[in-house]
Structure formats: structure tokens, C-alpha cells
Amino acid sequence: MIPCFWRCPAGVMKLYFPKISYVRLSRFSFSKEPLLFAAVYALAVAALASPVTYDRLAASERHGRDLVLALDTSGSMAESGFDEAHPMRRKFDAIIDLVKGFLTTRHDDNIGLVLFGSFAFAASPVTYDLAALQMIVDTADVGIAGQSTAIGEGIDQALRALSFSHAKKKVIVLMTDGYQNAGSVSIKEAVAKAKKRGVKIYTIGIGKPGDYDAKLLERIAKETGGKSFSARNAEDLKAVFEEIESLEPSPIRSRTMINRRPLYQWPLIGAMILLIGYLSFRRVA
């Protein structure tokens, strides 16, 4: 667009003033007008872009972590009786509601979601957009990844989601109500990879003792520096999430940008000065 201030007027001048040398130039030379108009245009565009500055010190005070929820979606998650307040409600539905409540408290974290059954997949990469993540959580359902339980693949996919992270603190919260009975990735291999990458794993056994492999979950948590929990019912799981909150607190992210300073007025003032100066020269000429 800016080069047009030089090339476009030139064509017009040739059309109407074939002998431009015969025409007396005003004091404000025509050759300077394209430069002035280009400068005014650039300054106006800069002002419309609404440039701002922020306090870098305030921004550096945010210390979030990257966290992945690895959720078992095997067939046993369709069982009822987990939520004592709603006995006919599926175990999975009660867990989903508690997961969504947990997400609302993670103000300054990147969070991802991995679903595992017979296989595992990342339903969402780690993201700051927790509202969008809650919508994805709503789409999850029992059997979406098969009816069996591949805990090793669940951990492996969670690690894959965290592999793109540059956060210093990386956490996996693994929830399952069964035993490892599927998948091509061994739990031992997945845990070794987590230890090597410094990823902490919190494990949550869902249901009554014996429904899940409690010793295995304890070993996973211990070897990675995390902690293992058990949740017989929805109230227990709520308490577990509250304890994880205390163990892995998330700093509160300010809803407004601190020390936000608009800069649009400076290019706008510059454009006005140039236009006023140009009009003054035209009047004198």
C-alpha cells in the first residue's frame, strides 16, 4: 500500500501534466508529498492497531504448571452406586462433574486430557483455554477408548502430551477403577519414562478395595514422587481433589493485565502534526 504513494500519483501526473517542467512548483515540493502521506498512513495504522505495553515483572510472577488428567473410560465406569446422593447415576458421570469442578480452580495451569480404555488417546493437548477443555470433557463417555484398561498407554499418552511443554512442573493425575489388562505399553516402561522426564504422577483408585490394583497405583505414585489415593465414592473423590489442590496449588491468574499502558495516542499525535503541518504549507503556498 505505501509504495502506491509514489507510483500511483506519478501516473496521474503524466496523464494531466505531460510537460510537468513547465508547471511552477509550490514551496512544498510535490516530491515530498508521497513521503508525508506514507508517514501519515503508517502512523494512522499503528494507532488503529492499539499498541500497549505491560509490566514484565508482573507477568513473570505467574508460576503455573502443566497438568494432564488421564481418565479411565473402560466399561466398568458405567456401573452405578458410586454417588450415594444419586445411587442410579453412573460412576463416570459423577467423576466427570468432579473433574469439571477441579478445572475451575486451576487458574494458572495448562491442562490436557487423556482418555484410556483398550487404548489411549489425547482428547485435548495441554491448554490455557479451560472453558474449551470443559466442553471436551463433556464429550467423553464410557467405552470411547474401548472396554478394557490400558493404564500403561494412558501414562504414555499423558507423557506425550507433556513432551511439548516447557513448564518446570509437570503433573499427571491418573484415575482408574481397574487392572491393567490391555495395551502395548508396559506400566514399568511408562513409569521409567516419567521418572526420567521429572513428571510427577498422582494416582486415584476409583471404587471399593479390590476393584482396582491398589499396590500398582501406589508404586506408580511413589516412584515418580507423587501420591496415591483411593476413592470409594463421590465424596471421597471430592476430598481427593481438594488434597491434590493443597499438594499442587495453582497461583491465581489476574483477570486484568497489570500496568497495561496504551500507546495509540503517540502515533495518532504524530499523524495529526504531519497533517497540520502539510495544510499549513499548502495555505502559505
Image: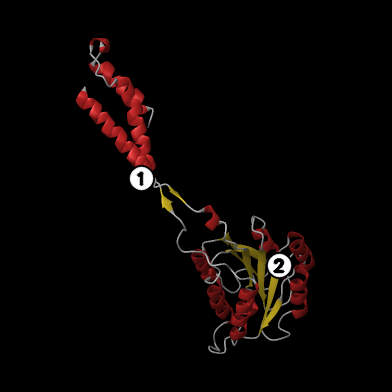
Nearer to me, 30 or 218: 30
Q: Earlier in the sequence, mark 1 or mark 2?
A: 2
57 to the left or right of 46 = right
What residue do we see at 54% from left, 87% from top? Answer: 88
Image vertical order of residue 146 relative to residue 165, above or below: below
Q: Quadrant of residue 273?
A: top left
Picture coordinates of residue 240, whole percent (x, y): 63, 80
User: Could you tell me if residue 173 is visible in this image?
Assistant: yes
Q: Are marks 1 and 2 in contact (CB under 8 Å)?
A: no
* Mark 1: amino acid: Gln
Within 10 angstroms of label 2, few (less than 14), some, or many (20 or more) residues?
many
Tag 1 secondary structure: helix
Q: CA distance from mark 1 to mark 2?
A: 49 Å
Label tally: 2
* Mark 2: amino acid: Lys
Quadrant for the N terminus in the image: top left
Within 10 angstroms of label 1, few (less than 14), some, or many (20 or more) residues?
some
Tag 2 secondary structure: strand
Query: Which residue bears the numbered disc 1?
Result: 265
Nearer to me, 20 or 78: 20
User: Could you tell me if residue 5 is visible in this image?
Assistant: no
What residue do we see at 37% from left, 42% from top? Answer: 266
What residue do we see at 79% from left, 67% from top? Answer: 188
Quadrant for the C terminus in the image: top left
Query: Which residue bears the numbered disc 2?
Result: 200
- Name the front one of labels 1 and 2: 1
140 to the left or right of 190 = left
Picture coordinates of residue 169, whole percent (x, y): 66, 62
Q: Which label is found at residue 247?
A: none
Picture coordinates of residue 100, whole percent (x, y): 53, 73
